[in-house]
Amino acid sequence: MRMSRSAATLGALGLVLAGCSSEAGQQAEESASNTPSVATDVQFQPGTTMAELHDAGTITVGTKFDQPGFGLLNPQTQTPEGFDVEIAKIVAGELGIAPEDITWTETVSANREPFIQNGQVDIVVATYTINDTRKQVVDFAGPYYIAGQDIMVAKGNPEGIEGPDDLAGKTVCSVEGSTPAQNIRDNYPQANLVTYDVYSKCADDLTNGNVQAVTTDNVILTGLVAGNPEGFELVGNPFTEEPYGIGLAKGDTEFRAFINDALEQSFEDGTWAAAWDRTAGVITGEQAPEPPTVDRY
Amino acid sequence: MQFISDNSDLLWSAWLTTLSLAVASGVCALVLGTVLAGMRVSPVPPLRGLATFYVEVFRNTPLTVVFFFLFFGLVYVDLQFPSRFTTAVAALSLYTASFVSEALRSGINAVPPGQAEAARALGLGFGQTLRTVVLPQAFRTVVPPLGNVWIALAKNTSIAAGFAVTDLTAALQRLANLNADQLLAVFAAVVLGYLVITLPSAWLIRVVENRVAIVR
Amino acid sequence: MSGPSVLFDLPGPGARRRQRIGTVVGSLVVLGLVALALWRLGTHGQLEPERWAILFDPATGVPQALWQGLLNTLAVAAVGMVLATVLGALLAMGRLSDHGWVRAPVGVVIEFFRAVPLLILILFCLLFLPTVGVPMTAFRALVLGLTLYNMAVLAEIFRAGILSVDRGQREAAFALGMRKTQVMTLVLLPQAVRRMLPVLVAQLVVLLKDSSLGFIVGYVELLRTARSLVEFFNFSYGNRYTFVLYVAAGLIYIVVNLLLSALARYVEARTRRNAKAAAAGEGELPADVQMGGGGGAVPVAR
C-alpha cells in the first residue's frame, strides 16, 4: 500500500542519496491490491439512490485532496489516498461499485455543502464534522471517526501555546468554512484568525513565521507534522469533539440508513480497522481506536 | 436579504480592503511601470534589455503564480514582507507594472517622431526630451489604456482572496458557505462592491479621455 | 514613432564611455543580487541537483503529472477560446446592429462581464448555476467563466475590427444588392477576423494565464498540479521539493506563453505579407487586455 511505502521512506528521510537521481524516484512502483471487497450480487429497491448508483456503476465522491492520512492526491496515479478514501471505497463496494469506478472530486471546506445540495457529488467523505448548522442543509451518515480540535505550532513551541486560551493576540491559521475556524471566531475572538482554502498553505505560513499557530482537527495536524517533524509540533491538547460523518443529500433517509449499515458492518468485520491501519494509522503510529457509535438521528 | 445587515461589518471592511489593495498597488505599479517604460526607450542597451526581460517575464506569468512566489517562495531567499496585505500589494504591483510599462511605451511610440526630433534639435537631452516633450503627450494618449489597466487591477485584487487576504472575494466565499440558500443575494452584494469601483472608474476615464484628447 | 532612436542622439565617445562604466557597475549590482539570491538558495539546499532531478525522473511521476496538468490547462484555454470567439463575434454583430433593442442589451451584457472579476464569474458558475439545475463540473465552471469574460473582451476587439474594414467594402456590397446580414457575414466579418487573427492568438496567452484560477475551484490544471505535487511530497519529505515545483510550473507557463506570442507574431507577419490584408492594424493586444482576469470596462480598441 502506498501509505506504508511513504512511511517507509519517512524513516529513511535522513538518507541522502548520491548521484543525480531524485530520492522520490527511488520508490519502486509497486501496486498492492488492498482494496476492500466489492459486492457482486446486490439488489436494491428500484427508485432508491442505491439502485440508481448501482445501475450507473459509478459514484461521485467528494473528498479532500490535500490532507495526509485522510485524503491526499497522489499525482502519480491521479487518485486520492487516505482513510476517507478507504471509507468511501467501503461504501462503494457495498453498492457493487469497484474502486476504479469511483469519480473523485475535490471538495474544499468552503464548498462541501453547495456541492451536496447541487448534486455535484453523491457523498462527501472529507473530514466532515457533523454539526447542527450543517444538518439544516445536508444529512450525515456516521460518524466513522471522532477527532478533536488541536493546535500545531513551530517546533519547540516558541510562543508557549498550550491551549486555545493562549491564542489571544496571536495569529492563528485555519481553513475557511471549517468548524475549527468557526469555533475560533465564535469562542476565542481575541485570536487573530486568518483563513486559507487549504491547510497546506497554513503549514507554509507557519514555516514562514507569518502565523504562530495552525488550528484544526488533531488528525489533520498529525499529518502535517508527519511531513515536517523538524519544523512543527502538535500541542496535543484537543479541546473539542469533531465527529466525522459522510455527507449526503438532505432527506435521503434510505441512503443514509444504507451507509450507516455499511459503516457498522465494517466496524464489526475489521475492514474499518484495517483501513485505518494502512492510512491514518501509519501517520499517528497508533493502533486503530475503538470505532465510534453510528448516530441514526 | 437579512444576511446583508448581519454581515455589513464584514462586507464593508472587505470592500475597504479591496479598494485599498487596488489603490496601493495602482500607485506602486504606476511608478514602477513609468520607470520601466523609461528604461525601455533609453539610449543604454543594458537598461533596455533589463526592462524588456522584466516585462516579458511578468507578462507571461499568471498573476496567481506571482502570488505563490511572493507568499511561499521568497522565504527561500530569506526575504519576507511584513504582512499579507503588503505581500499582495507587491504581487499586484510587480505584475501590473509590466502592463503599465507596455501601455506607456505604446503611448510614447504614438507621439509623432517630429516632436522628439524638434526637441532634440532644440538641444534637449534624452531625459529632458522624455520629461518635457514626449511623456506629457504620451500620458494623454495612454489615458484610456492606463485607465483600463487600473480597472483590470481592481478586478485582479480578487486573487488575493486565495492568499488569506480578507477582500470582497474572500467575504463571498465565507458568506456563500454560511448562506448556501441565498447564493444569488450573496453574489449580488459582492458584485455590486466591485461595480461600485469599476463602473465609475470607466466613466471617469471616458470624461478625462475627452478632456485631454489631442485632436490630430 | 519609428523606434526609440528618435528620442536621443547617437551617443558620442564621452557618453559611450559613461555608458560602458554604468553598464559594468549596473551589471555587477544585478549579478551581485542574483549571486546573493542563489547563495541564499544554496544555503537552504534548494540548488542540490538531486532536488531538481525530480522534475525529469519519470519514476516519481512528476514529469507525467506536470505534462498532464499542462494538457488540462491547454484544454480549458482551447475550449474557452473557441466558445469565446464565436460568442464574441455574435455580440460584436449585435452591438453594431441597426436596432436599438438589440444594441442596448448587448451593450449591457458586454459592459457587465467586463466589469466583474473573472474569479467571481467562475465561482458564480460553480456555486450558483447548479442550484438552478445546470449541471456543473470544475472544468465546465472554469470554461464558462473564461468564456463569459473573454467573449465580452473579444466582442470589443471584433467590433473595432469590423469598423476598421474599409467603408468602400460595405458600400460596394450594398451596391451589389446584398442584404444587411449578407454584408456582415460574407464581407465584413471575414475581413475583420483576418485582421484580428494575430490578436486572437495573443488572447490565447491571456486565457492560458487565467486558467490558473482553476486552482480555486479544484480543476487540476498546471498550477494546481504543482500544488498537489507539493502537498504529496510534503507529506513524505517536508518542504524539500516545494520551491523546485513552483519554479517548474512558473517556467512552463512562461515558455508556453512566449511560444504563443511568437506564433502570434508569425501569424501577423503572414497576414501582413498577404496583399489583400496589407492594411492589417496593430497585432498586439492592448496592454490592459493582456492583463487578463480583468481587462477594461471601456472599449479598448477604437
Image: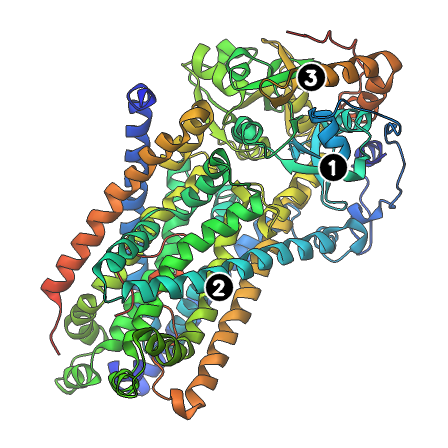
Disc 2 + disc 3, Cβ < 8 Å? no
Q: CA distance from mark 3 to mark 1?
A: 18 Å
Is C171 located above or below residue C137 in the figure? below
Residue B100's label in the rendered image is: none
Marks 1 and 2 on same chain: no
The crowding category of the residue bearing disc 3, from other C-alpha atoms within 10 Å (few below 14, some 14 to 19, many at least 20), is few
Question: Does residue C28 appear left or right of residue C58 in this picture?
Answer: left
Location of residue A140 in the rendering, given as x and y in whole percent from the top left corner: 63, 16
Q: Which residue is mark 2?
A: C205
Is A60 located above or below residue C269 in the figure? above
> Which image quarter: residue A31?
top right
The quadrant of the image that shows the C terminus of chain A is top right
Is C47 located above or below residue A250 in the figure? below
Identify which amino acid the numbered label 1 is placed on: Ala
Identify which amino acid the numbered label 2 is placed on: Val
Location of residue C208 in the rendering, given as x and y in whole percent from the top left corner: 51, 59
Query: Please, which chain is the residue tagged with disc 3 on?
Result: A
Q: Which secondary structure lies at badge 1?
A: helix
Disc 1 + disc 2, Cβ < 8 Å? no
**Residue drawn where x is 85% and y is 20% of the image:** A271
The crowding category of the residue bearing disc 1, from other C-alpha atoms within 10 Å (few below 14, some 14 to 19, many at least 20), is few
Marks 3 and 1 on same chain: yes
Q: Nearer the viewer, residue B15 or A201?
A: B15
Chain-order first, disc 3 or disc 1: 1
Q: Residue furthest bottom?
A: C275
The quadrant of the image that shows the N terminus of chain A is top right
Q: Which residue is mark 3?
A: A254
Identify which amino acid the numbered label 3 is placed on: Glu
Q: CA distance from mark 1 to mark 2?
A: 39 Å
Is C246 located above or below residue A70 in the figure? below
